[in-house]
Image: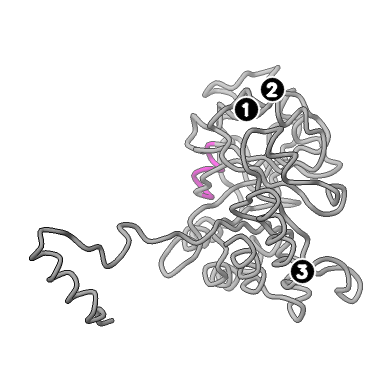
Amino acid sequence: MRRPLLPALLAVVLALCGLTFAAEPATAQQSPRSAIYGGGPFYADGQAVMNTLRASGFTTVILWSIHVHPNGDLYYNDVLIVQNGRYVGGPGWPARLRTLKQAPTSVNRIEVSVGAWAVPDWENIAKLISAQGTGSSSILYRNFQALKAATGADAINNDDESYYQVGPTAAFARMAAGLGYSKFTFAPYTNQSFWASLKSNLGSLVDRVYLQGYAGGAGNNPATWNRALGMTVDPGLWSKHGSGCSAGDSPATVESKMRSWRGSAGIAGGFMWLYDDMKKCSAQGTAAAYARAIRNGVS
């Protein structure tokens, strides 16, 4: 692309006067952060879904959900993927995940989410820490090390919806940081005091909070969570889903709500739940449409 003539002439004139002119910013403005949660399709849909995500505009992909069994085995939803310190899942999945960050792509971050509603993942983690600790010989250490190698994840996302105990959770987070998961993120919908205590304990290790603004978290106000946690949260919404794809938010309503939260809470990013539903209800909104809605809403 040609440089405009006027800035070039102006630069010459100013140079003669001993001044300088910056025709472009020193650093390009980054796209607002936007995250998307996804379940089975992220594992089972092959390279096609990776290409969809790369072209979507979403900057973060969150693999939902890793379940920790009582013996330490790790399942991606219902599929065993890590056992006895080794990745035992589909042989092609790690290579497909690596393509997410390969240019051209909008994705610059991958997170693995641990927990969900009505599952004892964090309870199991606490029991394993109590029995074995978090050292290099523990099953948690060895299995999450294998998970890191397989997924290339940059962060662990905590989707605890039942346990809510700071001590074991913080111990796990620090173990994960030592394994190369550089950040530990939250996905709260309730129990604000627990999340505030955990954030205080972990400090800068927590760089994002994905506040649920749907289902049980539908009444959440990002501004109050900002104050409680001492950081700006990224609120999320549920895409079109359900019978006839009639429930949930369209890209248009996502943009409107994000814009409102930008004004009331100063949000700088947001997220969408859930790619699986976007796939089923694609006529009501594609991944790219939802990413664009977040980007427009928070810009």
Q: Nearer the viewer, mark 3 or mark 1?
A: 3
Amino acid type, residue under disc 2 in the picture: Pro
Secondary structure under the numbered disc 2 in the rendered image? helix
* Residue at x 78% of width, y 46% of height: 221
Q: Can residue 107 be found in the magenta stretch?
A: no
Q: CA distance from mark 2 to mark 1?
A: 6 Å
Q: Are marks 2 and 1 in contact (CB under 8 Å)?
A: yes
> Which label is found at residue 253?
3
Between residue 124 and residue 115, name the one nearer to us. 115
The residue pinned by badge 2 equals 168
The residue pinned by badge 1 equals 172
Left or right placement of residue 281 versus residue 202 in this view: right
Amino acid type, residue under disc 1 in the picture: Phe
| The quarter of the displayed image where residue 91 is located | bottom right
Q: Which residues are magenta?
A: 145-151
Q: Residues within 10 Å of mark 3 (few under 14, many from 20)?
A: some
Between residue 20 and residue 294, name the one nearer to us. 20
Q: CA distance from mark 2 to mark 3?
A: 39 Å
- Magenta segment, principal secondary structure? helix
Between residue 18 and residue 89, name the one nearer to us. 18
Task: Tell me residue 225's x, y (percent).
Answer: 73, 39
Task: Tell me residue 75's x, y (percent).
Answer: 70, 46
**Picture quarter with the C terminus:** bottom right
Task: Tell me residue 168's x, y (percent).
Answer: 69, 22
Q: Of the residues under marks 3 and 1, which one precedes in the sequence?
A: 1
Secondary structure under the numbered disc 1 in the rendered image? helix
Q: Image height check: is 4 above or below 191?
A: below
Q: Can residue 150 be found in the magenta stretch?
A: yes
Q: Residues within 10 Å of mark 1 (few under 14, many from 20)?
A: many
